[in-house]
Every structure is written in structure tokens, then in C-alpha cells.
Image (spheres, coloured by chain):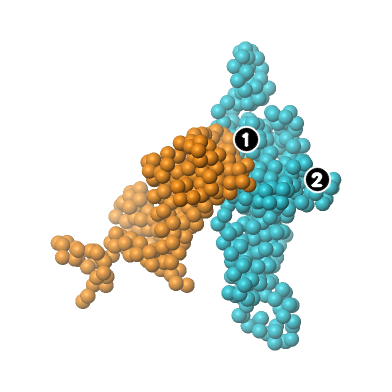
Amino acid sequence: MRPFATSLPVDVSSPGSDLSELDVPGARRRSALRSLWRHPRGRIGCILVGVVVLAAVAGATGLTPYNALFQNNAAILKAPSLSHLFGTDQFGRDELSLVMQGLWVTLEIACIAVAIAGTVGTIAGIVAGYLGRWTSAVIMRITDMLFAIPAILLALAIVTALGPGWLDSALAIGVGYIPIFVRIVRGPVLSLRESAYIRAGRVLGFSPVRLLFRHVLPNVSGIVAVQVSMALAWAILAEAALSFLGLGPPPPTASLGEMVSASSPLAATAWWTLAAPSVAIVVAVIGFNLLGDGLRDAIDPRTQRH
Amino acid sequence: MLRQIGRRLFTMIITLFGVSIIIFLILRLLPGNEVTASLGVSAGLLSHSQLAALDRYFGIGKPFYEQYGSWLGSVLTGNLGVSLQSRISVASLVGTALPVTLELAIGAMLIGEIIGVGFGVLGALHPAKFVDNLGQGVSIFGLSVPTFIIGTGMVTLLASVFHYFPSSEGFVSITANPWLNIQQIFFPALTLGLGVGAAIMKSTRTAMLEVIGLNFVRTARGKGLSRRVVIWKHLLLAAMIPVITMSGIQLGYLLGGTVVVEDIFVLPGLGRLLITSISDRDFAVVQSVTLIYAAAFIAVNMVTDLLYTWIDPRTRA
């Protein structure tokens, strides 16, 4: 009998790898990545996110076309040209280099925010779905209350309390997204709890921690991955909005939102000072949204090609 | 129906109660307290007895639940406290700011519904035609470009191309000068309404396309009803549920969006009040304004839920 998935890069000849191992999570992950690449929006998302991340990393490591802080007095408010692709600002700094650096600041804060939201939210969601009525009820009521405050206002309140700063912005943005992770994780866990293999594990005397993290968590990792991508798009927006309002990280780390706000008196004569950071924000947000779309379809075959 | 409203109101009050605890807790994390916030660095010049007197006055050092209890007690009796910065009662600050935000939110929602439902219906009736493509273009723009960029762009455009800045003479209320007031509200409302409209358009178009091929539409046409009646009465009503859901969600988002837009267009609404009190660390104001926003958000969600049951009898369990 032919194996089902001969195209998978699994070394069948190596000892101990019989056919039953073809359906290991690793193989499934590879095929999910492949269908992500086949998904038209997913592919655009991958490319956009790739460009954004590369630009941000280059900005952080100083691999920018110019030194972002170098003030060239001979090139003040120059329109985009071959030497300055995004033009220059009122101090003669290269906009592209500034945007690349700002992208890193924004992305870094967004990633930490989503890491906070994802970790806390997923654990709370698993616990709420798995444990008994009381724990679940308490977690869900707290979630409902957090959900009842518009996320951006929650972030504003937390920034007020902690003061504008780098980690503080991340925390402020992250907290607002925790309820979403709790909700999307809890549902599947509720049904997993009753599945045969989890009950078997219980009978075998596995500890709840082992059951939750070795057996339940991998099953919800897919939906968490999708939500992480969507959350990143949201966090980038939220970070940009907070720093636009002057509540982002303190100078000299200019994030993209701060650049937009700084450009507003100049934009009438030098449109590129507004356009450059705006394009970066929009591309990043669209990229992560499309990536999330693609991931969702890749992970859940039912939604494919509808 | 009445029982349902009662039950929802009850849960709403419980949630609001929890929200007030959360907000109170978050703002208690604030380093420093009312004394340092109102006196700044000069708080360090106070003698021990002066500090102790002020601490007693502001209730600093009392256990958390006592502080919360006294705050909640005064909020329930309509006393929102006094702004540390301006020494004006928070209630009167909110009283002047709230109508501005309400007007902005209503205006934005109106523009959003006109753009959203209008383009959504036309797009579904003429798929892939000019109207549809235009609508889709507006929708992609509104969904992907954040409000603060649209707002900054709009202010720039108005100022540079039309040499026009509606708020330059200061905000006037709608009763004082309705015409100038509408000009001042229109552009911020349009900024917010574009995003709202984009989302509503998407769900209107999908919902319309879903019901457009159903039998009852053919029946309605077959029994001789005019095209207009079929479209605007039968189709739209059947497609209404997702549109209302989306409108409710968007109205919720819009509340958060007013903060940014009021900041850009210098409108003296709740959002601007919130931002200025955050930078002044005036947390009596921050606390109340956040609570008002949360209450509005919860109320919007509740009304949306109740609207379904009213429009779609099938959801009446």
C-alpha cells in the first residue's frame, strides 16, 4: 500500500519511522505552511509581514540606508528621490531610515503586548475550559468585565497608571487583548475535556498540568496562532494610536505613531513626512491581517476555497 | 420582552460594578497620590504634619475597600469628585464635554450608515459594476487606514488646499451657531464614519447577496410589488440582522475612536478631556470619564442584543 503523503519530506527509510508516524504534528505543520503559501491572501500576508520584519530588523541593527539620526543640513525637507526614497524631514534626516527604526520600536512593543495577552489569555482560557464550574465562572466574569471596557481606553487607563514607557505601553496594549484569547481558547477546551483520549489520560493518572500542557495545549495551538497574527495587527494599530496621542515610549525612540503626529504641521508642504510612517503602519496591519486570514484557512480545511 | 430587558439591565449593572472595581484598581497602581499630583515637586517641601493632614483630607492610607466604597458611594449620589487641576467638579466638566462627544458619535454613525448601507445595497444589486468597485475601494481604504492617519490627512488637506480649519475660532455649541457647529463636527465625523462605514458596507453587501436569491424575493416581485419596495422593505429587512450586529460593534469601537479624533480636531469632548487629564495625572477625571465610556459601551452592546429580538422574532427564546 502506498503511503498517503509521499510528498512529505519525511525520511521513510530511517529506522523507527513507520507510516503511522507520518501524521506527527511536525508533518501537519509543514502541510499547513504549504497551504498557507497556496492561499492567495495568505501568501500576500506572508510577503508583507516578511518585508516589514526585515525592514524592522534592519532598522534595529543599523542597516538603514542612512544613519537615522544624522541631520543633513544640506537636505532639509527634500521630496522623495533616488537618494532619499521616502524624502527627508525638517532636520534633514532620511525618512526611510527613520521609518525602519520606528517600525522596530512599534513591532517590538506589539510583540511583547501580544506575548503577554497570548500567554495569560491562553492559560486562563485552558484553565477556564478545563477546571470546574467555580474557577471557570470567576475567570469568565473577569473576562466579561475586561471586555466591557473599550480596549484602547483600558490601555489609556493603564498608561496613566504606569506612566508612558516601553514595557508599560506593551502591558497596557496586551491587557486589552487578553479577553479575546480567553474566549477563543475556552470553547474548544470545553469539548476536548470530554474527548476519549483526555479521559483516558485522566484514568491513567496523568497530572492535570501534564494533561493541560502536553495534551490540550497542542490542540488549541492552531487557533492561538491565528489569533496571534490578528492580535499583532491590532497591537500595531494600538501602539501607533497611543504614541500618536503622546503616550508612547519616551524619546529618543520615535515609534511610527509619534512620527505621524510630528508630521502633521509639516504635511501640508511635505506630504511624504506623513505618507512614509502611514504607509509603514498600513502595510504592517494589512500584512498581519492577511497572514491571520491565510493561517485560519490553512489550519481549518473546512473554510478552504469557499 | 420586558423580562428580558430586566434581566439584561441586571447583568449590565453587575458588569458595570466590576468594571468600576477594575478601573479603580488600575488607577491605584499610579505611583504618587493626590498630594503629589496636585502639588508636584513642591509636595517635598511640606512638613510631616502638613502631609499627614493632606493625606487625611484625600483619604490616603485608608484600606482599599474603604477608598473604593467612599468613591462608589459618591458616584451613586451623582458626585464624581473634583478635578485636581482645574478645581471644577468633574460632573460639570463631563456635562460640557459629553454633548460634544455624543454629537460626534451620532454624526459619525449617521455617515457610516449612509456610506455603509448605501454602498452595500447598491454593490449587492450591481455586483462588479462601477458602484460596487467604488464601494469596495472605499471599504478597503476605511478598513485598513487607521483613524488617526485619516484624521491627520484630512486636517492637512483642509488647511493646505482649502485654507480652512473649522475649529480655528474655537468650538461653538449647536444651540449657539448651528451652521458653524455642523461644519466643525462634519469632518471629524467623516473621519470616524469612513472606518465605520467600511465595516458596515462589507456586512450589508454579504447579507444582501445572501437573501437576494431567496424565494420570497421572487414571490414579492411576482405579485407585482415595485422594485423599490422589494429592495428597501423586503430585502433590507431580511438582511438587517448582520448589519445591526456590525453597527453595534462599530458603535462600540467608535467610542474609543472619538478619543483620537477629538484630539486631532481639537474638539472639547470627553476624549480630549480624558487625554488632557491623563497628561495632568488628574485621576479623579480619568476615573469618571473611563467609567462613562465603559457604561456607554456596555449599554450599546445591550441595546444591540435587544434589537435582534425585536427585529427577528426567531431569536425570541
Question: In the structure shown, which secondary structural element does the residue marked by tag 1 occupy?
Answer: helix
Q: Position of residue A44 (x, y in %)?
A: 44, 61
| Residue type, mark 1 in image | Ile
Residue B154 against residue B278 in the figure, above or below? below
Q: Which chain is orange?
A: A
Residue beneath the point at 35% across and 58% down: A198
Q: Quadrant of residue B205?
A: bottom right
Extreme right residue here?
B176
- In front of the other: B217 or A210: B217
Q: Position of residue B10 (x, y in %)?
A: 67, 51
Report which residue position mark 1 lands on. B278
Q: Is residue A284 visible?
A: yes
Q: The disc numbered 2 marks a residue on which chain? A: B
Q: Which chain is cyan?
A: B
How far apart marks 1 and 2 lie (CA) works out to 25 Å
- Check residue B173 in the rendering and tell me which mark sits there, or answer none: 2
- In front of the other: A28 or A57: A57
| Residue type, mark 2 in image | Ser
Q: Quadrant of residue A62?
A: top left
Question: In the structure shown, which secondary structural element does the residue marked by tag 2 occupy?
Answer: loop
Q: Is residue A23 left or right of residue A291?
A: left
Q: Position of residue B87 (x, y in %)?
A: 73, 28
Residue beneath the point at 58% across and 52% down: B146
If the image is split into quadrants, where does the N terminus of chain B sit?
A: bottom right
Q: Are marks 1 and 2 in contact (CB under 8 Å)?
A: no
Extreme front residue here?
A74
Q: The disc numbered 1 marks a residue on which chain? A: B
Q: Nearer the viewer, mark 1 or mark 2?
A: 2
Q: Does label 1 or label 2 sit earlier along the sequence?
A: 2
- Check residue B89 in the rendering and tell me which mark sits there, or answer none: none
